[in-house]
Amino acid sequence: FDAKTFDLWDTINEKGTTMNDVVILASFIQEEAGMPAEDAKVSACFHNRLESDDPQWAEHKLESNASSYIMNDSDNNYLWNSPTAAYYGLPAGAITNPGIDAIAAALNPDQEYLDEGYYFFVTGNPNGDHPGEYFYAKTADEHHQNCIIAGWG
């Protein structure tokens, strides 16, 4: 771990964060993106939520499939799941072991997606017309439409 993350310490210090917080956020990115090509965009969505003053995100900043308690696969619709804990910020620890790509993305979210204000993402249903494709949205209404297109609605 130390060898893989050694080059990130300057960035961590510049951003005023801790390796622990980076790893915790990266664990969500790892679970939600799962593909290095999408890590920075998913990271931007989480960063926008975490840094938002909008009351909508007050208790659900990291709400995602990875933070949901899902009893049955049929409950997994990527839109209506509620997290078991309403994370105001980061939880106490990582939810998985993130790879170096997710760790780097936690530190370096996609700047365009940060600036444009993306908050939502969904991947295509494996049994639908867009398996594994990522859809991003700025509003809940856009996200709902993306969920339908992605084959979850």
Image: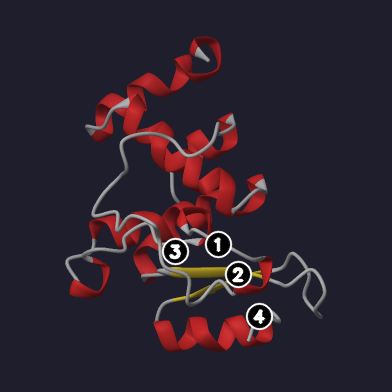
Q: Is residue 54 above or below residue 106?
A: below
In the picture of the structure, the residue carrying the numbered disc 3 is 113
In the picture of the structure, the residue carrying the numbered disc 1 is 70
Q: Residue at x 23, y 55 (%)?
A: 88
> In the image, which is nearer the foreground, mark 2 or mark 1?
1
Residue 152, label in figure? 4
For the residues labelled 2 and 4, the Cα–Cα distance comes to 9 Å
Q: Amino acid at mark 1?
A: Ile
Q: Are marks 2 and 4 in contact (CB under 8 Å)?
A: no
Q: Are marks 2 and 3 in contact (CB under 8 Å)?
A: no
For the residues labelled 3 and 1, the Cα–Cα distance comes to 28 Å
Q: Does the rendering let one see residue 110?
A: no
Q: Secondary structure at mark 2?
A: loop
User: Where is residue 36 shown, x and y percent of the image?
Assistant: 64, 45
Q: Are marks 2 and 1 in contact (CB under 8 Å)?
A: yes
Q: Amino acid at mark 3?
A: Tyr
In the picture of the structure, the residue carrying the numbered disc 2 is 76
Horizontally, is 89 left or right of 138 in the view?
Answer: left
Q: Amino acid at mark 4?
A: Trp
User: Where is residue 43 shown, x and y percent of the image?
Assistant: 46, 52
For the residues labelled 2 and 1, the Cα–Cα distance comes to 7 Å
Depth check, front residue: 53 or 148: 148
> In the image, which is nearer the foreground, mark 3 or mark 1?
1
For residue 99, which quarter of the picture?
A: top right
Near mark 4 (Cα within 10 A), the count class, few <14, some 14-19 or many ≥20, is many
Looking at this view, name the residue that lies furthest to the front.
71
Near mark 3 (Cα within 10 A), the count class, few <14, some 14-19 or many ≥20, is many
> In the image, which is nearer the foreground, mark 2 or mark 3?
2
Work out whether mark 2 precedes mark 1 in sequence or the reverse, and give the earlier one. Answer: 1
For the residues labelled 2 and 3, the Cα–Cα distance comes to 25 Å
Depth check, front residue: 8 or 123: 123
Q: Residue at x 32, y 42 (%)?
A: 91
